[in-house]
């Protein structure tokens, strides 16, 4: 049933999430929520040499929110704060096979968390 609703990329990231879990000694940790559906995404990152050296996520949400968080962390690891700005909800959607409008909120939640992370890092 899931295979009929989601792309292979979404299912892969959902069933085998990358970088899931807590990050002890994180430089920064943020939490974003979607008040409409109740999804919650936490990102924790450790910086090193001006780049995101390590990043982890914890997500309580739908299949798409978990998949988007997993993909986001893959894209962020090793990037500078400036380079992270090129990641958008549309990019996540495209790389996950094109999210339908009903599940696009998962990509937006990931980007909301990214923006919080970048702002927190800029002001630390």
Image (spheres, helix red, strand yellow):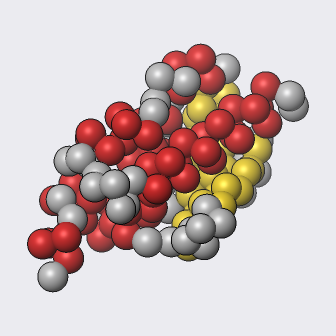
Q: Is residue 123 above or below residue 5?
A: above
Q: Position of residue 13 (x, y in %)?
A: 31, 59
> In percent of the image, x 20 and y 47: which residue is there?
97
The foreground one among 18 and 11 is 11
Q: Is residue 82 left or right of residue 64?
A: right
Q: Position of residue 105 (x, y in %)?
A: 46, 56
The foreground one among 38 and 102 is 102
> In percent of the image, x 47 and y 23: which residue is there?
86
Q: Can residue 23 be spotted in the picture?
A: no
Q: Can residue 90 be spotted in the picture?
A: yes
Q: Is residue 119 left or right of residue 79?
A: right
The quarter of the displayed image where residue 82 is located: top right
Quadrant holding the N terminus? bottom left
The quarter of the displayed image where residue 119 is located: top right
> In percent of the image, x 20 and y 76: which residue is there?
2
Q: Position of residue 94 (x, y in %)?
A: 27, 39
Q: Is residue 40 left or right of residue 99?
A: right
Q: Is residue 72 above or below residue 34?
A: above
Quadrant holding the C terminus? top right
């Amino acid at each position: 049933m899931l295979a009929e609703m989601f792309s292979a990329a979404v299912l892969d990231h959902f069933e085998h999430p990358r970088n899931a879990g807590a990050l002890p000694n994180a430089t920064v940790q943020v939490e974003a929520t979607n008040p409409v559906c109740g999804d919650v995404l936490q990102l924790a990152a450790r910086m090193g040499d001006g780049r995101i050296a390590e990043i982890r996520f914890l997500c309580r949400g739908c299949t798409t929110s978990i998949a988007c968080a997993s993909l986001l962390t893959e894209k962020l690891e090793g990037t500078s704060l400036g380079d992270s700005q090129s990641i958008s909800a549309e990019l996540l959607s495209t790389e996950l096979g094109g999210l339908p409008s009903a599940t696009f909120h998962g990509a937006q939640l990931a980007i909301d968390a990214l923006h919080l992370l970048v702002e927190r890092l800029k002001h630390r």
